[in-house]
Amino acid sequence: MEFTSETEEAPKGSGHILKPMKLQKAFAEAGIELPTRLSRVHDGRFLLPGILLRADFAIPTPSSPFERLYIQARAFKSDALPEIRSQVDGECIPHALRPNLGSPKAGVFRL
């Protein structure tokens, strides 16, 4: 699986809620092999207020003839990181990767 990760430096007193290695491990365990690009940003641009994580599935097009997944995660205040990471790792990712409608990939897109 092609997996790329871009990380902006989080402001002082903040950290990123999603670790690339944990996401890669979850994908591997679920048998998901979509090309994926993870962007970890500090300001949450392109995310609505209150949204910590966003995943966009791109269908094949003439210029890019394969499925791919774009994930964006924002930074959060350091004092809340353990609880948020626990929720993301323990609930959000497993829920999103759960098979749906008979397809092993279908659950990925419900983040």
Image (cartoon, rainbow, N blue to C red):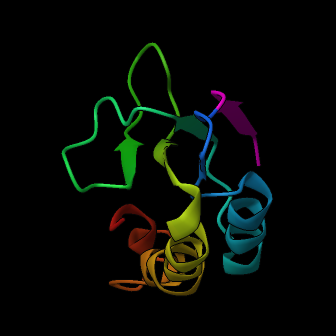
Q: Residue at x 69, y 73 (%)?
A: 26
19 lies above or below 8:
below
Find residue 43 and report its horizontal and vertical position in percent.
41, 32
Of residue 65 and residue 5, the one placed in the foreground of this image is: 5
Of residue 20 and residue 10, the one placed in the foreground of this image is: 10
Corner quadrant of residue 30: bottom right
Find residue 1 and report its horizontal and vertical position in percent.
77, 49
Q: Residue at x 66, y 29 (%)?
A: 9
Whether the magenta-drawn stretch holds residue 64 is answered as: no
Find residue 35 and report its horizontal and vertical position in percent.
64, 42
Instruction: Find the magenta span and give its range.
Output: 1-9
Whether the magenta-drawn stretch holds residue 3 is answered as: yes
Q: Residue at x 23, y 56 (%)?
A: 50
Of residue 39 and residue 80, the one placed in the foreground of this image is: 80
Is residue 64 rendered to the left or right of residue 59?
right
Find residue 16 and report its horizontal and vertical position in percent.
60, 50
Is residue 77 rendered to the left or right of residue 109?
right
7 lies above or below 23:
above
